[in-house]
Image (cartoon, rainbow, N blue to C red):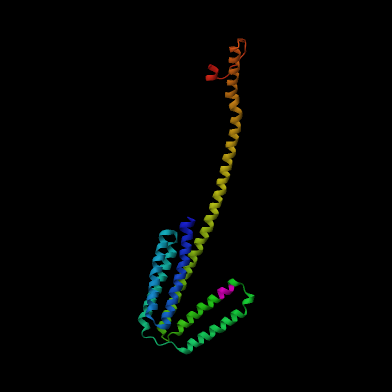
Amino acid sequence: RIVSVDASVAMQAERASLVMLDAQRSERSYFLLHDQDDFKTNQQTLDGLRDMIESLRGVQPRESNTIEKMKADLETYQQEMRKAAERISEAGEPRVDRLRSAVLTFEKDLNNILRGAHRQSRGSLVRELHDRTSRFDSEIAAAGTEDPILQSISTELEDSANSFLSQAAELENRNWNRVVNDHDNARALMVRAEWVLGSVSFLVLLISVWVSYVLPKEVVQPLLDLKAAVDHAAAGNYEIEFDVRGKGEVAEL
């Protein structure tokens, strides 16, 4: 289960997040450059993402509610992209002054971040850079048009994408937690199995020791006594006393 279900779903959820980020990059390029190739790339990415999400349902049925929410967010995102495609031909060209302002602000923020990098851990620095880069992408996309309808669509796209990413992150975390729990349960099962096998081995050892004492006394020793009596009889000594005890072939003989 760890390999085929929990870890598989967790990795698929992580991959779904990465695919959604790819869709957002093509979305922002489309808003900025109005290139139909970017729109086609975005739609193809979303179609593949829908198939990926649907495959999770069969692997992990207990996550059906989360999967339905992710599908709803994805559908909303794709519908808003289609609205943007219908509106994009009427949008104006990007304002160079707004683009320049966004780039200058981004450059200034990067300098500030790197200036204080020595006081931060590598992980926090990477997260801060990632957040600032994502915000720069949004600023560039917003600078790509003055159309208020497209700005509204851009907001809806960002909201649905963020909701999708949030659901994917929760799905990933829950399944990685299941991986940890299943691993702990497997280790506990192994420990119990070792105790059981150890107990059985000890019991077998006791039985073996008991048999090693009982068998000579109950079977081998009477045979030795009988052989000694036969040897005396063969030598002409018929007055040998032979104590026969128990039942069975030896006593009859």
Residue found 45% across the figure and 68% down from its top: 16
- Considering every residue shown, the one lying at the far front of the view is 235
Magenta-colored span: 124-128
Count of numbered tags: 0
Residue found 60% across the figure and 30% down from its top: 212
- Considering every residue shown, the one lying at the far bottom of the view is 97
Task: Indicate whether residue 127 is drawn in magenta.
Answer: yes
Task: Indicate whether residue 81 is drawn in magenta.
Answer: no
Residue 243 occupies quadrant: top right
Q: Position of residue 171 (x, y in %)?
A: 48, 64
| In the image: residue 181, left or right of residue 82 | right
Residue found 40% across the figure and 59% down from its top: 58
Q: Position of residue 3 (x, y in %)?
A: 48, 57
Q: Position of residue 73 (x, y in %)?
A: 42, 71
Q: Main secondary structure of the magenta part?
A: helix
| In the image: residue 165, left or right of residue 219 | left
Q: Is residue 9 visible?
A: yes
Residue found 64% across the figure and 75% down from its top: 119
Q: Is residue 247 visible?
A: no
Q: Position of residue 175 (x, y in %)?
A: 49, 61
Residue 9 vs 120, above or below: the answer is above
| In the image: residue 150, left or right of residue 199 | left
Frontmost residue, 148 versus 213: 213
